[in-house]
Image: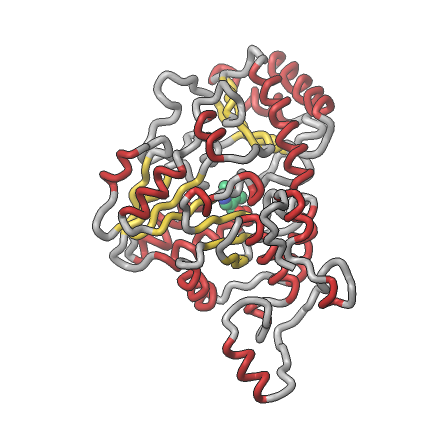
Amino acid sequence: MTDDDPNHSDATRAVSAGRDPARQDGAVNPPVMRASTILAPTFDALKAQRRVVSGENYSYGRHGVRGTFALEEAIQALEGGGRTRLAPSGVAAISAALISVLGAGEHLLMTDGCYGPTRATCDGLLKRMGVETTYFDPLIGPEISGLFRPNTKALFLESPTSWTFEISDIRALAAAARAHGAVSLIDATWASPLRLKPLALGVDISIHSVTKYVAGHSDVMMGAVTAREEVYPRLRTGWRQLGLAVGPDDAALALRGLRSLAVRQDRQAQTALILADWLAARPEVAEVLHPARPADPGHALFKRDFLGSSGLFGFLLPPERASDAHLSAFLDELSLFGMGASWGGFESLLIPNEPPLTRAASPWPRPGRPAGQLMRVSCGLEEPCDLIRDLEAAFARLAAA
Ligand SMILES: *Cc1c(COP(=O)(O)O)cnc(C)c1O
């Protein structure tokens, strides 16, 4: 069951896509198949198995089993087309996608607002492979054309940007990449496959850290890459040669998370707006970074391209309240917010970023905008009023520090 009914909303599709009870004795969910070896009953069947490169006929554990195919199908349905492959983490998905479309002597255009480990891949693995990276200002517009070279083969976006929540003009950048014969890729983890449809905006490859919203329960590492049909063969080859596979138990957890993604994300997005508005009204907060707020500089582009929001946003504490002693006072006794990497789970997190932010092509803070200590909030499923009480106490401790 692929759920390609165009009348279905995404919330419905998240529930129905990738399900086929008739093939599993009526069970609602696919069985967890712990399988490396898949036996062929006859020589003819073996030959048929070998011809299948991916899809729902399986031949060997590394190429997928029932549950991983179901998860790929479901994500593919939410991405609105293309073909999806899974990776053992979001970073694996990003690096493998880049390796699949780039080679020695080629050039990559990378957003300056990318996730830290993505930058490390460009400056490390890709550089050693002979791929040169130029970082571009995430707020760049048509001037991006001037950065393309004859050997530019890929352009990579992330919007909103990690930590700084800046919104890029996805359509313009994807169109420029296409005009210059380069593959466009986007890390769309913030929006989840529900709230941004990169392929429909002209992007070739959409990437998610499934670890975050899709799995949603802070207990799985996984990534997903969805490519337009024309680009997919390169991805499939890359996946085969890198030997990427995910475990059937992790796939079952991620699929279970996906089934409730729409209600979780709606609630988390709502809570984030409540908290962001509350923080914006606090005298101790220099600025709130959240593109779904009308006051945000990226709001117009956000409204044009995104179908909704999510539960992750930032705020700045002014420099005079951001010493280590201030931060300890603010953070150490939070009762609901945890302090840790990752986000998108059912539980709220609050974490400062270690300054200085690494930027190569664009200033931070932006000229004319406040400076300060970046804090990132991941809203969970708690009652917003309880979260606000936790923050109120933190601000009281900050004032006393
Ligand atoms: C966490 C994250 C990743 C990496 O995902 P992992 O599953 O942790 O490897 C990639 N991109 C963004 C924007 C992230 O926040």
Figure quadrant of residue 168: top left
**Residue projecting furthest to the bottom:** 43
- Numbered circles on residues, count: 0
Figure quadrant of residue 346: top right
**Residue projecting furthest to the top:** 283
**Residue projecting furthest to the right:** 26
Q: What residue is shown at x 44% (from left), y 58% (from top)?
A: 229
Q: Position of residue 203 (x, y in %)?
A: 41, 46
User: In terms of depth relative to the viewer, which is nearer, 21 or 186?
Assistant: 21
Compared to residue 262, the image places residue 58 above or below, namely below
Q: Position of residue 58 (x, y in %)?
A: 59, 72
Q: What residue is shown at x 78% (from left), y 67% (from top)?
A: 25
Q: What residue is shown at x 49% (from left), y 15% (from top)?
A: 320
What kind of colouring is applied to the model shown? secondary structure
Q: Position of residue 150 (x, y in %)?
A: 21, 51
Give the side of residue 57 with respect to residue 179, left or right. Answer: right
Residue 322 in view in this figure: no
Q: Position of residue 335 (x, y in %)?
A: 71, 28
Q: Quadrant of the N terminus?
A: bottom right
Give the side of residue 332 with respect to residue 365, left or right. Answer: right
Q: What residue is shown at x 43% (from left), y 31% (from top)?
A: 167
Q: Quadrant of the C terminus?
A: top right
Residue 155 in view in this figure: yes
Compared to residue 94, the image places residue 373 above or below, namely above
Give the side of residue 272 with respect to residue 314, left or right. Answer: right
